[in-house]
Image: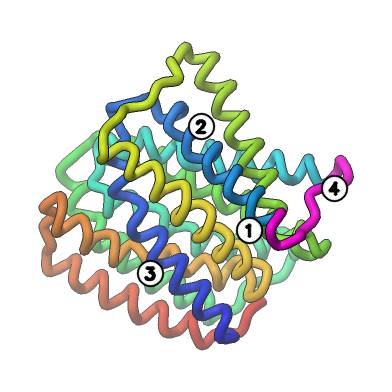
């Protein structure tokens, strides 16, 4: 990994580990679909401004807009909608834990699309990391049947996210700038969520509270514009499998935040789980990109 990749990796871990708490703060106040419309409307506008300032292209043939639309559906709308609904029965840190399955799903998707077996070291790293995640998550599943429903919603959201990863990687191979693709993808995702919200009869309202508005700004600017640009750049430079391991690292920090703010209780099994996550990260960091 280049120094730039390490910086992007760190920004992704920080941006996403701090995103789950403000996401949970929005639940129950306004319909998730509406909150996502506001989030990605702001994010898309900021991306467009950055694209203009950098002099990046915005005009692309129709075949690319089909990819941008699919990115919007998979990454910038449906993925988050499923996690919003899952958050009703889970602590914010555990949402991040469930999202960590993206590491293994990315690797399997790349292997299926390229018809090549994944590197053994990648599988070992992901297996160790996900094993640690399961140890952290298990006590919650053991005491709540509703947690299983939330976990299934999270799994579906993760599959959507990873599908979008592959589409983003294909656009980068055609030298489409990440910010340009994200600008269109976020706009399409915003429009897609707006249609869903209208069909479901939700009102487009905003809550004038520091918690909601502050969380909305953080989710739009840092967790969406900056973190997604860094993450999808990593997907293009080091591969989806290796980049996806960031999703196994940031849950550790998300759980620490949940401990301080939501009173999440650690167990001995959870501490062992963290050790596994860190061990898997070291193995993945030494693995060459595919």
Segment colored magenta? 52-63
Cα–Cα span, label 2 and label 3:
28 Å
Q: Closer to us: mark 1 or mark 4?
A: 4
Cα–Cα span, label 4 and label 3:
35 Å
Q: Is 229 within the magenta?
A: no
Q: Which residue is mark 1?
A: 109
Q: Which residue is mark 3?
A: 249
View extreme (top): residue? 201
Q: Closer to us: mark 2 or mark 1?
A: 2
Q: Of helix, strand and loop, which one carries label 2?
A: helix
Q: Earlier in the sequence, mark 2 or mark 3?
A: 2
Q: Earlier in the sequence, mark 1 or mark 4?
A: 4
Q: Which residue is mark 2?
A: 37
Q: Quadrant of the N terminus?
A: bottom right
Which labelled disc corresponds to residue 90?
none
Q: Of helix, strand and loop, which one carries label 3?
A: helix
Q: Position of residue 221 (x, y in %)?
A: 47, 52
Q: Is residue 258 above or below residue 103?
A: above
Which labelled disc corresponds to residue 60?
4
What residue sits 14% from the left and 58% below the top? 260
Q: Of helix, strand and loop, which one carries label 4?
A: loop
Give the quarter of the image for residue 133. Answer: bottom left
Q: Earlier in the sequence, mark 4 or mark 3?
A: 4
């Amino acid at each position: 990994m280049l120094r730039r990749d390490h910086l992007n990796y760190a920004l992704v871990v920080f941006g996403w580990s701090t995103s789950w708490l403000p996401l949970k703060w929005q639940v129950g106040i306004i319909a998730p679909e509406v909150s996502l419309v506001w989030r990605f409307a702001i994010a898309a506008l900021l991306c467009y401004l950055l694209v203009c300032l950098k002099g990046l292209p915005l005009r692309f043939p129709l075949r690319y807009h089909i990819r941008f639309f699919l990115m919007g559906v998979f990454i910038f709308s449906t993925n988050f909608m499923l996690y919003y609904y899952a958050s009703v029965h889970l602590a914010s840190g555990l949402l991040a834990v469930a999202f960590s399955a993206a590491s293994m799903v990315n690797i399997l998707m790349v292997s299926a699309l390229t018809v090549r077996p994944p590197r053994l070291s990648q599988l070992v790293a992901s297996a160790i990391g996900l094993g640690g995640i399961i140890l952290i998550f298990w006590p919650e599943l053991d005491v709540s049947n509703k947690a299983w429903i939330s976990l299934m919603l999270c799994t579906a959201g993760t599959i959507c996210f990873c599908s979008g990863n592959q589409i983003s990687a294909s656009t980068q191979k055609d030298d489409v700038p990440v910010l340009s693709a994200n600008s269109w993808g976020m706009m399409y995702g915003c429009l897609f969520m707006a249609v869903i919200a209208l069909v479901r009869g939700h009102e487009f309202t905003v809550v004038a509270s520091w918690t909601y508005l502050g969380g909305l700004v953080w989710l739009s600017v840092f967790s969406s514009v900056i973190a997604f640009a860094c993450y999808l750049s990593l997907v293009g430079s080091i591969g989806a499998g290796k980049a996806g391991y960031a999703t196994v690292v940031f849950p550790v920090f998300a759980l620490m935040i949940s401990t301080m703010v939501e009173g999440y209780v650690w167990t001995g099994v959870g501490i062992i789980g963290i050790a596994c996550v860190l061990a898997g990260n070291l193995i993945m960091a030494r693995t060459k990109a595919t």
